[in-house]
Every structure is written in C-alpha cells, then in structure tokens.
Amino acid sequence: MKNRGLFVMGIMMLFTALVLAIVAGLITPDMLKRDGRSRGGSTPPKPGNDQTARQAFTQVTTWAAEQNIQSEMLSLSATMQKGEPSSDWTFQLYEPERKEILVVTQGEETRILREQKALYAQRAFPSEKWSTDSDAVLSAWWQASGQSVWSRASAQSLHLHLGQDPEGTLSWTVAILNEDGEVLDVFRMDAESGAILPGLEDKP
C-alpha cells in the first residue's frame, strides 16, 4: 500500500507539471482533442522542439549564469500532441536566497513564464546523478510499449517529465493520455542507471 501511495503521488506530480503548462498557456484544452487519426509513425516522437533535455538544460544553465540567477533545478518537462509541433522544454528553478520558484521555457529562446514564492524549502535536482538523456528514454519506451500505444487513435498527447519521485529517485516518466486526459500508458526509467522502473501494471 505504501508503494502504491508513493507511485500515485508521483503521477500526481507529473500532472501538476501538466496543469502548470496549461496555466502558462503552453497547452490549451483544445490541443488535447484531435480528429482520431493515427499518426504513430515508425520512430519515437520528439518533444522539446528536437532538442534533447540535456541540450536544453545546458542552455538554461548558461542563461541563468548570464542573468546572475543563483538557482537550482527542480524538474523539467515537455509535451507533444499527436500531429502537432512539440512544445518547448519547461523547467522549474528554485532560488534559495529569494525562496522563489521560476518557471522557465527553453525553445528558440529562454524566457521566464512565472515567478512564485516557495511555501517551503525545495529539494534540489541532483544533476550529478543524471546520465540518461530524453532521447534514450523515448527509445526505450518506444521499444517497450510506445510504438503500440502511440499508434492507437485514442493516444493523443505525450508528456515527458524528469524529476525526483517521492522516494528521492531521479527518474523519467513518459505518460500517454487520450483526449479526455485519461492515462493510457506510463513508462518510468531511473535517470542515473537507465534501469526501467515499475509502471502502473507492475504495482501491487
């Protein structure tokens, strides 16, 4: 029961990131509804405007240094709607001295979408443990279940998230949703070791 609760909490964190993207205007409700035609293709989708997460991370880190923003990484995510261009990468940064969270996007340029006060101290992104990039995660997901799931007409959006789960593991999550926002598939990978982590079907 404890593991189930932790896993559900992790999924809730992923959807919190999705809600933040909706609020920020990166995703609109209409974008979750498509005409039902399958556009699965033979290669994994590439959210993040063809940038890998590591490439986007490097650019955001450089930008933060240039802006003299003393921040720590909390999480990053990207969303892709079937048949549509992918969104930019979205980062959550934490400024300990100011106790603020910055929501930043990285695409053709880096920009701050929103600043908000942190209600409590945040757990920093352990970047030294991050060794698996987004392209490797998507390839593994594609081989495991992604090609089959993404080719379904009901599969309409892909959400990719990197952050710490409730147990403190830095992990990737790939979630596929239908037009009603229901989860069709979840794939998780340890961002340090590259090991595949338990998914929805593996939880007791």
Image: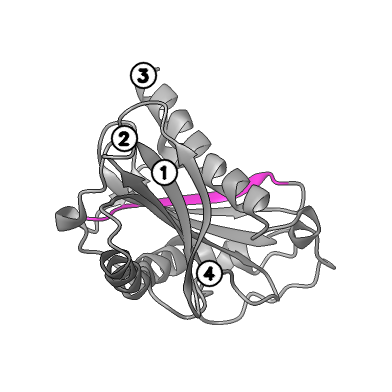
Residue 162 visible: no
Which residue is disc 4 drawn over? 88
Specify the quadrant of the image occupied by residue 45: bottom right
Furthest-top residue in this view: 1
Looking at the image, is 89 positioned above or below residue 186? below
Specify the quadrant of the image occupied by residue 94: top left
- Whether pointer 1 and pointer 2 mark residues with C-beta atoms closer than 8 Å, the reply is yes
Position of the N terminus by quadrant: top left
Precedes in sequence: disc 3 or disc 1: 3
Q: CA distance from mark 1 to mark 2?
A: 9 Å
Q: CA distance from mark 4 to mark 3?
A: 35 Å
Q: CA distance from mark 3 to mark 2?
A: 23 Å
- Whether pointer 4 and pointer 1 mark residues with C-beta atoms closer than 8 Å, the reply is no
Q: Position of residue 85 (x, y in %)?
A: 64, 77
Amino acid carrying label 4: it is Asp
Which residue is disc 1 drawn over? 101
Give the side of residue 190 with respect to residue 86, left or right.
Answer: left
Which residue is disc 2 drawn over? 122
Q: Residue at x 43, y 50 (%)?
A: 102
Q: Position of residue 60 (x, y in %)?
A: 35, 67
Foreground residue among 164 and 44: 164
Q: Point out the frontmost of discs 4 and 3.
A: 4
Foreground residue among 94 and 88: 94
Q: Residues within 10 Å of mark 4 (few under 14, many from 20)?
A: many
Q: Point out the frontmost of discs 4 and 2.
A: 2
Amino acid carrying label 2: it is Gln
Which residue is disc 3 drawn over? 2
Precedes in sequence: disc 1 or disc 2: 1
